[in-house]
Amino acid sequence: SVIHLVDYRAPAWHVEHVELDFDLGIDRTDVVAKLDLRRMANEPLRLNGEGLELLSVSVDGRQLGPNDYILGNGTLEIAIDVDRCVVETRVGLRPAENTALEGLYLSGSRDTGFLLTQCEAEGFRHITFFPDRPDVLSKYTVTLRADRERFPVLLAGGNPDGEGELEGGRHWARFVDPHPKPSYLFALVAGRLARISQDYTTADGRPVALHIWAEADVIDRCHYAMDSLVRSMRWDEETYGRNYDLDVFHVVATHDFNMGAMENKGLNIFNAKYLLADADSGTDDEYRHVEAVVAHEYFHNWSGNRVTCRDWFQLSLKEGLTVFREQSFSADMNSAPLKRIEDVALLRRAQFPEDAGPLSHPVRPAEYSEINNFYTATVYEKGSELVRMLAGRLGKDGFRRGMDLYFERNDGDAATIEDFLSALGEANDIDLTPYLAWYGQAGTPRLSASGQYDADARRYTLKLRQRTPAGPGQAEKRSLPIPVKLALFATDGRMLPLKLRDGTGPVDTELTVVIDQAEATYVFDDVDVAPVPSLLRGFSAPVILEFDYAPDELAVLLQHDVDGFNRWEAGQQLAALAYDDLRDGKQDSAAVTAWTGALATLFGNEAIDDALLAELLTPPGEIELVERQAERDPDRIRATRKSLLAALASRIGASKLRQRYQSLHARTTGALDAQSQAARQLKRRMLDLIAAVDESDARTLALAQYNEAPGMTDRLAALTILATTSTDGAAASIAHFRERYADNALALDKWFAVQAQLPGDDALARVQALERDATFTLRNPNRVQALIGLFARANPTGFHRADGAAYRWLAERLVTLDGLNPQVAARVATAFNGWKRLEPVRREAAHAVVAELAGRSDLSRDLTDILGRVALG
Ligand code: ARG
Ligand code: ZN
């Protein structure tokens, strides 16, 4: 059954207040829910409920018999003839049997684990009967009862409202949340947990007790998360004037979680992967991710919780906006250009391919059959890019004015994308409705540009043309407003003043034009030399730019562009041209020479910072390069990319690489400051480049680095080089790592992940052997992602072996996994996306497997939905 945006209807019944009583146990939990209901339309009451054992139901105190209601198909329907009433249900749950990790479930073992909930999007209906939709906002009073020995800690969202003893070694705790919220933001946690705490006072003077909870063995690894939380809270006060609004804020870590983290009101729950960070087992990347995800979930308190979504079609209203807020925060805390590079690289790696295949959907989808499959790169990352365009259009102060109005108007309410655009627009007297088209139209627009210089007239004419390719359900595409930030460079690196004909405002060296038609022409006067245009600066719109640069023009931008993003981008484009030439057998082409030459020069430039240099020295990855092939052959892509690295390494020269490696290595510490991180990152690049020309030298360096590493970043980089250059030769280090981190689940995930990504013919056999490791389990989503997910998504040569054996193996695993955890199975299955663009032999093999799976009738709605769409190719 497919749900359509156009069918939206306001809820027939509101729940003003809900009282929940939990009698908690691992095998059996009883839930009593008392709903204070108010009629909004003349319809029977329909409550959602799935997998619940209904024990009793009453209306205004009167017990109903089985003939007084209709139970089936995920709903409980009761005909009610009054406008206000109290409905009370009592249901039984079985948390320990819940392997889907949705609703109430057990994390960890029966003896030591704890109970927790995950409700977004539609998990609350697995806990009790309720109108489980985001536009029903209610005040919650929650009482938890449990055995004190087994469940010493009892938490729910809201402010604490009493606790005490009960007979038989049991105890209780109550929580009242004064802020009306939808059911997807409900949460509880119960078990043995340790905590760290900190006092915080908001800018508007509210004292808040901050608590981070985790199992005792990992609680020491939560301090970085606490610091990040405090930074996030300050930042949201300073940047958006948003203060926290309860007396307590709890954050809990679990190893068993389907996603990254969840913004439940007052009780955020995190996948441990995004909360724990310590010097011995966390990489630099992971520290940054912890900071970003802690901020993301905290920022949801306003963009998501205080203002929530009217329906799940509006998901990007909270997710796109919150990703944008999170990205801005990270840019402020770290390096803004590097953050931009990281974000755009992610968009290209994850969202562009999604949008180019059968899973393509608009940022605001028009229909879905399973909403869990829409927590996608499109809704999150492209959604953030749309907010960024709007913010750019309004400028810093205008955007803040718009956000203030958005929060003020919609506080305590469930809003839509239209509400967002109208608040931003009205606060600035600007009509933003043209941007709505971006939310409703899928596909990555192509922006083709061409320039013409007239030396006699000293005139530069820039032509832009846009076109969005057809996609599922959308044959015809409209023109969109595309902001193009641009500058013109002379070949000596000078920026030229921009005198746009018919333009207003002062002459500057950078300006933004917005093309909102299929074509537009811009004429610049008084241009004294033939310029090299720097277009789409800072990646001013999520499009694919096509401009026929000559290699030496890109080299000019790579050398001189002051927009850090575009400088990197010029290098990426140039590397891609060089890649095409190498693929076509042109070893010494202009592009190869220009790319390696420019980087060799930058390599010697002391002024350029280590982290940016490391990024510049990294050509597009195998997954990005796939997009350049009409028919993809992973083996060929990998081999060509390797020769690209080799060309760069030999141009710079092995001895210079080694020297730089040694000097970085000599000053390596485990310190977390930006400079130390940058040094580690550059050092890793040096190893990769050395490996491209002299594997045995790289191995010698890597082995020493592995043994002396002051922290995980260096250790893991070294292990990766060792294992990639010779799996057998790395056996001792791999065994050592396994032993050293035997008790650290997140580090073991990395151990699986490194091996899952090793390329080549024996990759599948290796993964199958790893499945037999005592610590492998299909029940833990992180472990599944580390081994199976990464093999399928990040090991192109291994997964796409020509005989199709890995496809067939994955199909078997998906069926088993689906029986345990449909959400995780569906996500892993997206690895089959793009099968249609494989070269013929692989395409045939993949199609056979996908078609067979898609034809089964015994799979979950989650997996069926993905397979059905992927099969369409
Ligand atoms: N809202 C969570 C976040 O912060 C993610 C929830 C994901 N839920 C799901 N069913 N996939 O992004
Ligand atoms: Zn989110």
Image (spheres, rainbow, N blue to C red):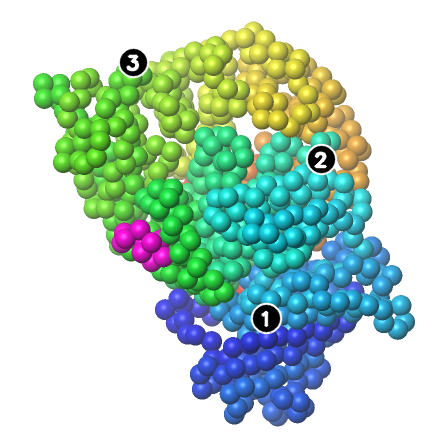
Q: Secondary structure at mark 1?
A: strand
Q: Quadrant of residue 5?
A: bottom left
Residues under numbered marks 2 and 1 in contact, where contact means CB atoms less than 8 Å apart: no
Q: Compare residues 589 and 672 and report the one nearer the observer.
A: 672
Is residue 475 something that shows in the picture? no
List x then y, in percent, for residue 62.
66, 92
In this figure, which residue is indicated by the disc labeled 1?
139
Disc 3 marks which amino acid?
Asp
Is residue 134 something that shows in the picture? yes
Q: Compare residues 556 and 426 and report the one nearer the observer.
A: 426
Q: Residue furthest front?
A: 205
In this figure, which residue is indicated by the disc labeled 2?
278
Within 10 Å of disc 3 (Cα), the crowding (few <14, some 14-19, many 20+) is few
Q: Residue furthest right?
A: 168
Q: CA distance from mark 3 to mark 2?
A: 47 Å
Residue located at (59% from left, 31% from top) = 760
In this figure, which residue is indicated by the disc labeled 3?
492
Residue located at (18% from left, 21% from top) = 527
List x then y, in percent, for residue 245.
58, 57
State the mark number for residue 873: none
Within 10 Å of disc 1 (Cα), the crowding (few <14, some 14-19, many 20+) is many
Instruction: Mark 3 or mark 1: name the one nearer the start of the chain.
Output: 1
Q: Residue furthest top?
A: 655
Q: CA distance from mark 2 to mark 1?
A: 38 Å
Ligand 1 is within 8 Å of the C-beta of the residue at disc 2: no
Q: Quadrant of residue 284?
A: top right
Within 10 Å of disc 2 (Cα), the crowding (few <14, some 14-19, many 20+) is some
Disc 2 marks which amino acid?
Asp
The segment highlighted magenta reads 421-431
Q: Compare residues 232 and 719 and report the one nearer the observer.
A: 232
- Residue 4 belongs to the span the image colors magenta: no
